[in-house]
Every structure is written in structure tokens, then in C-alpha cells.
Image (cartoon, grey):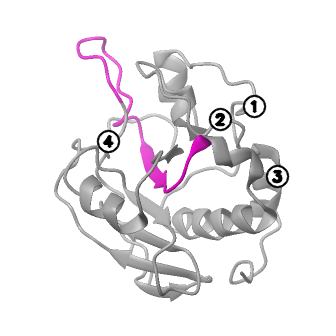
Amino acid sequence: MVNELWLPEGHHWDLHIEHRKSTNNAGKFTGGGWKWVLHTTEGGSYDSNCVLLRQVNTPHLVFGVAPGNEHWSVAQLLPFNVAGKTLQNDSGDGYQTNRANAIQMEIVGFTSQVPNWTDLMYKRLANLFVLIQHRVNIPTKAPWDFSNPQRASDAEWVKAEGVVGHVHAPDNDHGDPARFAEGKFIDLVKNIPDGGYQL
């Protein structure tokens, strides 16, 4: 039976999954299209980011290389029924960023590395995305370009669904993860084999 709030712990789909539960969330979601918001940490190790982000600017997930593990690791910090806190949100404008049905993930690394990501990296992300889709109804699409990104309006952000980046979020000035190859990623997700890609 699928737990709709948490990914399964252990080794699944060639990923190491762990729970590092935090109570530092932005509260209940307020609606809109379901979206997967990608970020890059711009430094630090997998473990140091897990420790730091449990307490401040908490996302749902941290994804990176953990020493001693054969495959990439993902730590789930928050259940999928509460909002993360990794986006800036202007108070009093009547719109939400974090709480607009945004499942957020920090990828340990730098935006400058994104253009050099290999097919293997995109397959890792595809495996993880489909595991998330088993729990959250995020459509397999990317509404906006990552190579020539435009900042969404508040209303566009709330309505958007699919795979988006910090670079698209209103009220924010970050550019991560610019030049993510959304077309390649969506094709990999649509053609994923049963049980995910072997990594």
C-alpha cells in the first residue's frame, strides 16, 4: 500500500531514500496546479544541506551524493500534505508561492553545472519524479522554458502545473536551475520502464 505522504525508505528505483523529518513547514497548501519546484543548493554537501534545511528554508526533498551509497540519495524532510519554505513570498499581495501546491526539492550542486548534466542525471531525476507522482498528482509536463526563463506572474505561478524552477517563481530573484533540459526530462519520464531506469 502506497503511503501518500512519504516516499518509501530504503533502496528503491536505484535511489537511496531516507526520512529526516522536520516540523519547519509553511502550513497547508492553498491550491493551484500541482508543481514540482527544482532548486540547486549552490554549495554544501548532501549531509550538511539535510541538517541545515531541516531547520531553515525547508524543502520537501534534498537530493545528492551521500558518501558510502552506491546511488544518489534523497532525504524527505516534509510530508506531501504541507508546504515547504524555500521560496520568497511577498506578504499581503493575496498570492502564495510556497503554498500554491508546490512540492519543492533542493538538488545539491550548482546551477552552473546544470548544462553539463548527463543522461544519467536526468534518469535519476526521472526515477524520483515518478515515485513522487505515485503520491502527488503532478502532471508530466513543463509549462515554461528553463533555457530562456521568464519570471511568472503571481496568478501564473498559482495556476501552473508540472515541472518548474525557482527561476520562474514570482517574488524571487534566484536563477536556479537555469538551462535544465525540460524536454529531455519529460521524454524520459514518459518512456520510463517499469521499476524505473537502471542506474
Label 1 secondary element = loop
Residue 102 tag number: none
Of residues 192 and 159, which is closer to you in this image? 192
Nearer the observer, disc 1 or disc 3? 1
Tell me the CA gap for discs 4 and 2: 26 Å
Tell me the CA gap for discs 1 and 4: 29 Å
Tell me the CA gap for discs 1 and 3: 13 Å
Q: Amino acid at mark 4?
A: Phe
Q: Earlier in the sequence, mark 1 or mark 4?
A: 4
Tell me the CA gap for discs 1 and 2: 6 Å
- Region in magenta: 88-111
Tag count? 4
Residue occupied by mark 1: 147
Residue occupied by mark 2: 178
Tell me the CA gap for discs 3 and 4: 29 Å
Q: Give the prevailing secondary structure in the magenta stretch.
A: loop
Determine crowd level at label 1: few under 14, some 14-19, many 20+ residues with C-alpha closer than 10 A.
Answer: few
Tell me the CA gap for discs 2 and 3: 14 Å
Where 144 sits versus 123, above or below?
above
Q: Earlier in the sequence, mark 4 or mark 2?
A: 4
Q: Amino acid at mark 1?
A: Ser
Residue occupied by mark 3: 184
Q: Earlier in the sequence, mark 1 or mark 2?
A: 1
Q: Amino acid at mark 2?
A: Ala
Where 107 sits versus 152, above or below?
below
Nearer the observer, disc 2 or disc 3? 2
Of residues 61 and 189, which is closer to you in this image? 61
Residue at position x 66%, y 69% from top? Answer: 124
Say if the magenta span includes residue 129.
no
**Contact (Cβ within 8 Å) of mark 1 with mark 2:** yes
Of residues 33 and 38, which is closer to you in this image? 38
Residue occupied by mark 4: 29
